Every structure is written in structure tokens, then in C-alpha cells.
Image (cartoon, rainbow, N blue to C red):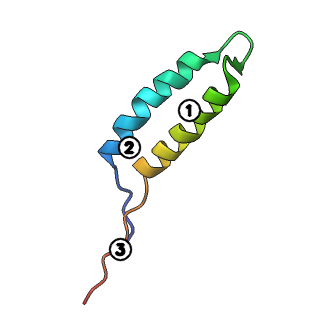
Amino acid sequence: MKDKIGFNMIFALMAFPLGLALLREFDFQNFVFRKQALGFLYLIVFIICVFLTFKKKKKETEK
């Protein structure tokens, strides 16, 4: 039996506003974050949320 890729709606709902905040924080003219610490924090949490959104489900063990 193959591992299935799951979709966790809670982390997807968290990733959407984080992605929007990340875009607002990024300055596209200079390719830097306006506030670097806040930008990197948004980026790290966004990556974690996307990873947890598409995390593989564990195999069910037979008893």
C-alpha cells in the first residue's frame, strides 16, 4: 500500500494569510525585506505551514 499525500486544511488556512503578509513585507524593487527579522520569521513559518499542509499520511498497521 502506498503512502498517500494528505492535505491539512488548518495549515493551509494558516499559510494563506502568512503568504500575503510575506508578499507585503517584501520590497520587489530592491529584492529585500522591509523589516528583515519579521520577513524571515514570516518566511520560516510559511515554509513550515506548507510542509505540514502536504505531509504524507502514516501507513495504517494491521493488527
Question: Could you classify mark 2 by the number of other residues whose Cα lies within 10 Å: few (under 14), some (14-19), or many (20 or more)?
Answer: some
Q: The N terminus is located in which quarter?
A: bottom left
x, y percent for residue 35: 66, 20
Residue topped by disc 3: 59
- Left or right relative to 29: residue 50: left
Q: Position of residue 62 (x, y in %)?
A: 27, 86
Which is more toward the observer, 6 or 16?
Answer: 16
First in sequence, mark 1 or 3: give its number.
1
Res 28 → quadrant: top right
Identified by mark 1, the residue type is Tyr
- CA separation, marks 1 and 3? 32 Å
Q: Is residue 4 above or below residue 29?
A: below
Marks 1 and 2: which is nearer the front? 1
Mark number, residue 11: 2
Residue at x-position 34% and y-position 50%: 7
Say which element carries label 3.
Answer: loop
Residue at the limit of the structure toward the left, as seen here: 63
Residue at left offset 25%, top offset 90%: 63
The nearer-to-camera label among 1 and 3 is 1
Residue 59 sits in quarter: bottom left
Name the residue rendered at 39%, 36% in the picture.
Answer: 14
| Secondary structure found at label 1 | helix
Residue placed under numbered mark 1 in the picture = 42
Q: Farthest top residue?
A: 29
Callout 3 crowding tier (Cα within 10 Å): few <14, some 14–19, many ≥20: few
The percent position of residue 38, horizontal first and vertical second, equals 61, 28
